[in-house]
Amino acid sequence: MELVAEPLTKAAFASFGDVIEMEGVNPFTINQGFAERFNDLANTDVSDEGGAVNISIVVTKPRPMPITLQVMERHPLGSQIFVSLQDRDWLVAVCTDPKDVTSYRIFRATGRQGINYGKGVWHHPLLVFEPESRFLVVDRKGPGKNLEEIWLGGDNSLRIRP
């Protein structure tokens, strides 16, 4: 089955988490008028079972074309934020049930958008078009099992048309 990417919007992504972008957010001036701050762009939810905030940078590379989804993952104990550090488009693949192909959605994010997967949301690892694509990641660290994976494999793999 082939899935077609749709534009990433706050409304379309709402059931999976937050779209992180400055559009539609009223900033306030800081640093003696030399900067604008855009607050409350996403809800970080990582404290279950003694978790704490982890901030990291991930450098990733493109998968072979055509892109095939082979694994879905989720994090039951915390949300997970990805913000592109470059102005490069990328893809976001989510679903409500990895075994139900009709529940999958593919979004094309701009390099000026980030996403925050809600706790327990099924998603594919980062999908980028260019090598050495960098992302700021805010997620959970600490005790407990916070990663579940389902391998799709074989006839259950899904292709993406960006």
Image (cartoon, helix red, strand yellow):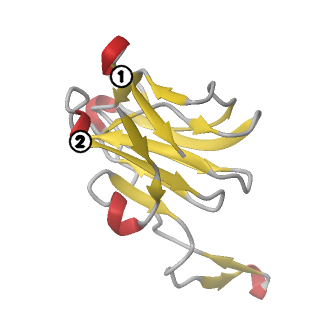
Q: Position of residue 63 (x, y in %)?
A: 62, 26
- Which numbered disc, 1 or 2, marks the residue closer to the eye? 2
Quadrant position of the N terminus in the picture: top left
Q: Residues within 10 Å of mark 1 (few under 14, many from 20)?
A: few
Identify the residue at horizontal 37%, vertical 33% (top origin).
Answer: 51
Could you tell me if residue 42 is visible in this image?
no
Q: Amino acid at mark 2?
A: Ser
Residue positioned most to the front: 1
Q: Position of residue 85 (x, y in %)?
A: 71, 50
Q: Is residue 146 above or below residue 106?
A: above
Q: Amino acid at mark 1?
A: Leu
Q: Secondary structure at mark 1?
A: loop
Residue named by callout 1: 147
Q: Position of residue 104 (x, y in %)?
A: 30, 41
Q: What is the quadrant of residue 3 in the picture?
A: top left
Residue named by callout 2: 103
| Count of numbered circles on the image | 2
Identify the residue at horizontal 63%, vertical 24% (top origin).
Answer: 64
Q: Secondary structure at mark 2?
A: helix
| Earlier residue among tags 1 and 2 | 2
